[in-house]
Image (spheres, rainbow, N blue to C red):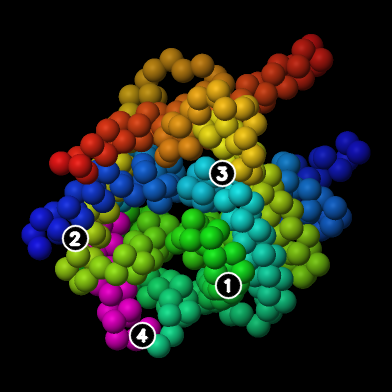
């Protein structure tokens, strides 16, 4: 178990220069959820994480779209990695991503018109979500499709985890509801501030503060054990 | 006509500030705001690109995409990427000092959500060419304002004695929340 953690930590560093070192699929998958969580650790894709997180329903819709786009584009980028020339790879990646984003946008408009209207331009904006292009460039373009798929699923679920936590918190506190059900009865005075834009920044800030506190505590414990 | 244009400009600049009220362009807002100079310059470069993209998006919508609205996202992103490339080449040729100062931030404008967001919002709101240009100017200046405000606060923060827990992004986010709250005060302008 300890060796697993060590390889994961090593693998997290030298992603950019060459291909990521081989490791079990399980680790490729878990890294996105925990150690390298795109929103909480790498701080990528913050725009959608705050813009559409005022209710859990929006959060779930957005996460589903991101998982779909991330999975399909990673798979395609990885399958075409030997065909795409290095000089035009970024343009090709963007085109692949934009294609899948258009598909998910049209599907959402057809089957979930209400959700599509609330999310508005934030669905097409997935094209410029740094998580997806980042994974294509740093991972999917350099490994076999199986690993790219595992990585994409992990990163997608990591994004979902962060987005759902943030949006559930904002909806409960700011509106007194969760997925539209009233939680606290008629006498609850909603903290409307939280579902407005500053509430998004504040929730994110609180989350980073809690994580910073958690990290410091862990570090203090480790030094205590060492001493 | 004039009041409509002025309304679009000021509402995008202050009330619906792209960064602080609509969460567009957060990457540069948190990534490159450690120095006032860089933040300011990046804002100006963004304004430039925003105006060009606004005009090209209008042209695309009016003349090219009338029969194929489903190709909008793909067409916009391709146009944005090439526009940024062209702007980069022009600046490199004519203003080499500015080019060196901006460095990596210039190509990164392509993946700034504010640019694509502007093209998309302009399309859903059906702005005319002139309205689009005012919209782009407002958005760009709003972005510049947000970037310079944040950068000035962060320069002061470097000198302050901050608890270890808040050293990284935590405090910056809370400050962004306060800035955003301050900008909410402009919403009162709408009724007047």
**Magenta segment, principal secondary structure?**
helix
* Residue found 49% across the figure and 56% down from its top: A118
Q: Chain of mark 3?
A: A
Q: Nearer the viewer, residue A227 or A147?
A: A147
Return the x and y of residue B97 as percentages of the image width and height.
24, 56
Few, some or many residues within 10 Å of mark 3 (<14, 14–19, 20+): many
Q: Which segment is the magenta one?
A: B44-66
Which residue is under mark 2?
B134
**Quarter the C terminus of chain A occupies:** top right
Circles 4 and 3 in contact, beta carbons < 8 Å: no
Q: Nearer the viewer, mark 2 or mark 1?
A: 1
Specify whether B71 is left or right of A31: left
Return the x and y of residue B189 as percentages of the image width and height.
20, 40
Which residue is under mark 4?
B66
The first of marks 3 and 1 along the sequence is 3
Which residue is under mark 1?
A110
Number of callouts: 4
Circles 2 and 4 in contact, beta carbons < 8 Å: no
Q: Chain of mark 4?
A: B
Return the x and y of residue A183 as percentages of the image width and height.
65, 31
Q: Nearer the viewer, mark 3 or mark 2?
A: 3
Q: Are marks 2 and 4 on the same chain?
A: yes
Please determine whether, in this image, residue B75 is positioned above or below residue A53.
Answer: below
Q: Chain of mark 2?
A: B
Q: Are marks 3 and 1 on the same chain?
A: yes
Which residue is under mark 3?
A55
């Amino acid at each position: 178990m300890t060796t697993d953690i060590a390889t994961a930590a090593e693998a997290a560093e030298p992603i950019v220069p060459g291909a990521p070192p081989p490791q079990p699929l399980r680790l490729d998958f878990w890294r996105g959820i925990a150690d390298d969580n795109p929103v909480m650790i790498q701080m990528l894709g913050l725009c959608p994480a705050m813009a559409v997180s005022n209710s859990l329903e929006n959060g779930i819709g957005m996460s589903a779209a991101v998982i779909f786009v991330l999975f399909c584009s990673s798979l395609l980028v990885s399958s075409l990695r030997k065909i795409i020339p290095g000089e035009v790879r970024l343009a090709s990646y963007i085109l692949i991503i934009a294609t899948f984003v258009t598909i998910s946008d049209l599907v959402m408009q057809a089957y979930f018109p209400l959700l599509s209207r609330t999310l508005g331009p934030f669905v097409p904006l997935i094209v410029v979500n740094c998580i997806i292009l980042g994974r294509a460039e740093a991972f999917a373009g350099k490994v076999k499709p199986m690993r790219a798929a595992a990585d994409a699923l992990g990163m997608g679920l990591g994004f979902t985890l962060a987005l759902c936590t943030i949006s559930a918190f904002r909806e409960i506190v700011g509106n007194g509801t969760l997925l539209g059900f009233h939680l606290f009865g008629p006498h609850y005075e909603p903290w409307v501030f939280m579902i407005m834009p500053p509430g998004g920044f504040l929730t994110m800030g609180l989350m980073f503060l809690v994580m910073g506190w958690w990290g410091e505590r862990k570090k203090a414990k480790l030094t205590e054990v060492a001493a | 006509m004039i009041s409509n244009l002025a309304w679009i400009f000021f509402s995008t600049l202050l009330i619906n500030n792209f960064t602080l009220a609509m969460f567009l362009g957060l990457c540069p807002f948190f990534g490159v705001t450690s120095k006032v100079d860089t933040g300011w310059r990046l804002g100006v470069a963004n304004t430039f690109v925003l105006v060009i993209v606004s005009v090209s998006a209008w042209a695309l919508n009016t003349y090219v995409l009338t029969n194929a609205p489903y190709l909008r996202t793909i067409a916009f992103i391709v146009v944005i990427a090439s526009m940024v490339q062209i702007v980069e080449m022009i600046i490199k040729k004519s203003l080499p000092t500015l080019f060196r100062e901006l460095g990596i931030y210039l190509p990164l404008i392509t993946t700034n959500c504010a640019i694509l967001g502007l093209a998309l919002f302009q399309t859903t709101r059906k702005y005319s060419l002139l309205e689009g240009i005012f919209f782009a100017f407002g958005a760009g200046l709003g972005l510049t304002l947000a970037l310079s405000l944040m950068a000035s606060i962060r320069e002061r923060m470097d000198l302050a004695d901050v608890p270890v827990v808040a050293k990284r992004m935590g405090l910056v986010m809370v400050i962004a929340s306060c800035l955003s709250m301050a900008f909410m005060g402009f919403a009162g302008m709408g009724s007047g």
